[in-house]
């Protein structure tokens, strides 16, 4: 007898429906075809033991399982459950095999029939609804995630017996109900950290506010213990909240990568990814034999924090340059090319020199001559060119640390950032590829960042006196535009340009001595 069940395979951040054809006929041996990997081939041993453990019958005749389309590689253990249900249907142990065509089924089987969680439940649910399936059967741990998709019946199951019983008595299971909007908005503003915990560092807070308002990349340079990492971890608390579309995009990426916790729904807060400096090129950017999203894609719509930037491998940093410009990363293989979104804000930190105390107000630098410039040269010019704000972080004095009063809260800063983003949203509403000032092209720069004669003369003198590089010119204008937006000013004023000039520390020819 021939029975068809339906599963799903993940490619990139999208799903492809897989038809699982199971034929039980006279003969011997089990066969599984359709480009299965080792995990799929091994499923037959898990399935046989799980079926026997639950006093069901595993046919001792010839079983042929085809995974169609047969020219697409099938990977992972999530095909266990649909194959097992197909075997039971083809051996007349499920009385309504015609109902199998109405559902997509996914899950990994344990030897006792328990169903384990899978990756990519959200894109699988979206594709199932798109193709007109009545429902989706997934592990209980993934049910809330898949249940975010409306107009699709999603059933969470914990054991193979529940699935068999469902096809005998459909009322034995109830579809899960998820109030996506309520869950999303309830957790959107809850953070474990806040800027009012930070003593002093007002200039750094201001720089982070400007970066958040304009979507600018930022690097913090300062000695150990000055508070660079502490400040960086508070950046998500002042970024505008995710909208539902951004949350859906972010959740799909984390779902595919298996980074969502059990019983998770929409990602409600902007991601903050902080990979260790030993991270490989593939782990940072994405890829592998079976392409998976890397850290820059996991930071999509959020912040990628690279602590101790010069310690990262040069090759890993250089491969980020194109994704930073295009806001996506393309992974190409012999038979397939996948795009992973990577629209992130880069936040980096570094010591000013190997010993960490160059330009320190109280401690002397012990590095030999030339080592400061050599350390800085670990970061290439093209990468540094994509960082708009360079901020020097100095240690906090005892008098600042001992103050009892709290600083400005994250919610207050966030309100100003949201207002500035709304101004930019209206400014670029006719352009689908630009959302913030940091993404302006040279053409938009000339049209939008017009400065008066006084400001132009100030910028000219600054570039000559501080020996700023040519690449600093565009960055200063973009940052000036963001500062003007924060001040709710229609035009860029001289004071806005003056403030922007101070955020180009690493462009000064004399900075490294």
Image (cartoon, helix red, strand yellow):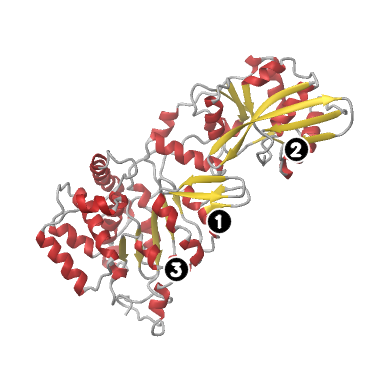
**Which residue has dot 2 on it?**
43
Q: Is residue 496 above or below residue 165?
A: below
> Residue 21 lies in what quarter of the image?
top right
Q: Position of residue 390 (x, y in %)?
A: 31, 64
Of labels 1 and 3, the one closer to you: 1
What's the CA distance linking mark 1 and mark 2? 28 Å
Rendered-image quadrant of the N terminus: top right
Residue 186 in view, yes or no: no
> Is tag 2's residue or tag 3's residue first in the polypeptide sequence?
2
Q: State the residue at coordinates (34%, 50%).
A: 194
> Is tag 1's residue or tag 2's residue first in the polypeptide sequence?
2
> Residue 473 lies in what quarter of the image?
bottom left
> Is tag 1's residue or tag 3's residue first in the polypeptide sequence?
1
Q: Position of residue 359 (x, y in %)?
A: 31, 76
Q: State the residue at coordinates (56%, 21%).
A: 175
In the picture, the disc for residue 310 is 3
- Give the SS element for disc 3: helix
Residue 343 in view, yes or no: yes
> Residue 426 lies in what quarter of the image?
top left
Q: 224 and 5: which one is in front?
A: 5
Q: Is residue 340 left or right of residue 244?
A: right
Q: Position of residue 298 (x, y in %)?
A: 48, 48
Q: State the residue at coordinates (72%, 36%).
A: 34
Q: Is residue 149 above or below residue 279?
A: above
Q: State the residue at coordinates (82%, 25%).
A: 24
């Amino acid at each position: 007898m021939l029975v068809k069940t339906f599963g799903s395979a993940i490619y990139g951040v999208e799903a492809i429906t897989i038809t699982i054809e199971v034929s039980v006929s006279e003969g011997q041996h089990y066969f599984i075809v359709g480009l299965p990997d080792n995990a799929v081939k091994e499923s037959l041993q898990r399935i046989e033991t799980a079926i026997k453990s639950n006093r069901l019958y595993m046919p001792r005749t010839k079983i042929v399982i085809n995974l169609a389309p047969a020219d697409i590689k099938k990977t992972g253990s999530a095909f266990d459950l649909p194959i097992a249900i197909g075997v039971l249907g083809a051996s007349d142990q499920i009385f309504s095999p015609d109902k199998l065509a109405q559902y997509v089924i996914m899950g990994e089987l344990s030897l006792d029939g328990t169903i384990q969680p899978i990756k990519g439940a959200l894109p699988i649910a979206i594709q199932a609804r798109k193709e007109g399936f009545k429902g989706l059967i997934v592990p209980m741990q993934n049910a809330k995630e898949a249940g975010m998709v409306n107009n699709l019946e999603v059933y969470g199951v914990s054991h193979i017996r529940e699935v068999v019983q469902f096809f005998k008595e459909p009322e034995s299971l109830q579809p899960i109900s998820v109030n996506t909007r309520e869950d999303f908005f309830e957790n959107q503003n809850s953070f474990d950290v806040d800027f009012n915990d930070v003593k002093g560092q007002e200039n750094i807070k201001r720089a982070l506010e400007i970066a958040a308002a304009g979507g600018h990349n930022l690097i913090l340079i300062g000695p150990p213990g000055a508070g660079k990492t502490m400040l960086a971890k508070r950046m998500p608390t002042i970024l505008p909240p995710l909208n539902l579309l951004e949350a859906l995009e972010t959740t799909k990426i984390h779902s595919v990568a298996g980074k969502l916790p059990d019983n998770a729904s929409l990602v409600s807060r902007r991601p903050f990814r902080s990979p260790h400096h030993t991270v490989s090129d593939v782990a940072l950017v994405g890829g592998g034999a079976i392409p998976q999203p890397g850290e820059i894609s996991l930071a999509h719509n959020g912040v990628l924090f690279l602590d101790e930037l010069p310690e990262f491998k040069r090759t890993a940093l250089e491969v980020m340059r194109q994704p930073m410009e295009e806001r996506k990363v393309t992974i190409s293989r012999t038979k397939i090319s996948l795009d992973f979104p990577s629209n992130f804000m880069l936040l980096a930190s570094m010591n000013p020199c190997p010993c960490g105390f160059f330009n320190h107000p109280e401690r002397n630098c012990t590095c030999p001559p030339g080592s400061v410039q050599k350390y800085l040269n670990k970061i290439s010019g093209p990468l540094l060119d994509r960082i708009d704000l360079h901020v020097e972080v100095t240690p906090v004095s005892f008098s600042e640390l001992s103050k009892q009063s709290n600083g400005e809260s994250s919610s207050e800063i966030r309100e100003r950032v949201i207002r500035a983003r709304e101004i930019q949203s209206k400014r670029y509403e006719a352009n689908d590829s630009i959302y913030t000032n940091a993404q302006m092209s040279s053409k938009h720069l000339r049209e939008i960042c017009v400065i008066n004669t006084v400001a132009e003369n100030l910028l000219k003198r600054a570039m000559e006196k501080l020996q700023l590089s040519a690449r600093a010119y565009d960055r200063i204008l973009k940052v000036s535009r963001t500062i003007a937006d924060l001040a709710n000013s229609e035009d860029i004023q001289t004071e806005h340009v003056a403030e922007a000039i101070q955020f180009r520390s690493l462009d000064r020819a004399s900075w490294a001595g």
